[in-house]
Image: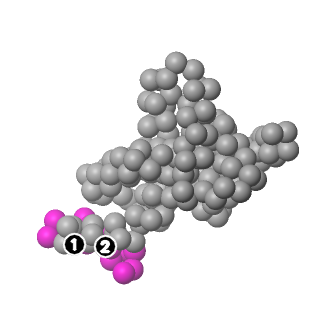
Amino acid sequence: MDEKILVEKLKNPSDKREAFGIFVREYQKRLYHLIRRMVINHEDTDDVLQEVFIKIWNNIDQFKGDAALSTWAYRIASNEALQFLRKKKRSMVFQNNMVNEMATAIHQNPEISGDIIQAKLQKAIAGLPEKQRLVFQLKYYEELKYEEIALITDSSVGSLKASYHHAVKKIEEYVTSH
């Protein structure tokens, strides 16, 4: 369905439920993978994704159409994932515990191959600061342009390029030293 028509239907009370079902089918996998790469754990990802869909349902009338619907949805998903990680970090005594927990989850994750390099890469990504991790995920895995990421993260293209560069350097250092 054309995005403009979908947005119109999402904003129309009589069409909203049906249109939202279409929206969920269209975006669920993409949003799930974005969130999963951020929070690692499947159950946590499902919880965050549910919150994302609730926010989208409740706030679709505020969507102005200045950006693509996908960009708006990615922004909500990335903000929810970061908010979840901040809450989780606050509940843990040290950030290292969180990184260790994520690394353990990576080893136990059946979707991640047992390949040593893949495991190192995932551990390196898990150890990045939240903003760098998000930028890396959106650029590397989602293959978004910096301009799209800027809309999602409300950041400048220059700062995103710097974040991505620093993330890549940290990942390279981790992979080659471990």
Q: Is residue 171 left or right of residue 13?
A: right
Query: Bounds of the magenta span?
Result: 1-14
Compare residues 138 and 150 and report the one nearer the observer: 138
The image position of residue 144, as x and y in percent, is: 62, 62
The label shown at residue 22 is 2
On screen, residue 5 versus residue 96, left or right, reads left
Q: Name the residue at 20% across, 67% down.
A: 17
Q: Nearer the viewer, residue 115 or 138?
A: 115
Q: Is residue 29 visible?
A: yes
- What residue is at 49 percent from the left and 51 percent from the top? 35
For the residue pair 79 and 171, the one nearer the viewer reads as: 171
Q: Residue furthest left?
A: 14
Q: Residue at x 76, y 53 (%)?
A: 117
Task: Please tell me how crowded label 1 is: few (under 14), some (14-19), or many (20+) other residues with Cα within 10 Å.
Answer: few
Name the element at disc 2. Answer: helix
Q: How many labels sit on residues?
A: 2
Residue under label 1, please give it.
Answer: 18
Image position, residue 120 (x, y; %): 73, 47
What amino acid is found at the position of numbered circle 2 in the picture?
Ile
Q: Residues within 10 Å of mark 2 (few under 14, many from 20)?
A: some
Query: Is disc 1 in contact with disc 2, using a CB cutoff of under 8 Å?
Result: yes
Kindly identify the amino acid type of the residue bearing the numbered disc 1: Glu
At numbered mark 1, what does the secondary structure look like: helix, strand or loop?
Answer: helix
User: Which residue is found at the position 61% from the left and 40% from the top?
Assistant: 103
User: Magenta segment, principal secondary structure?
Assistant: helix
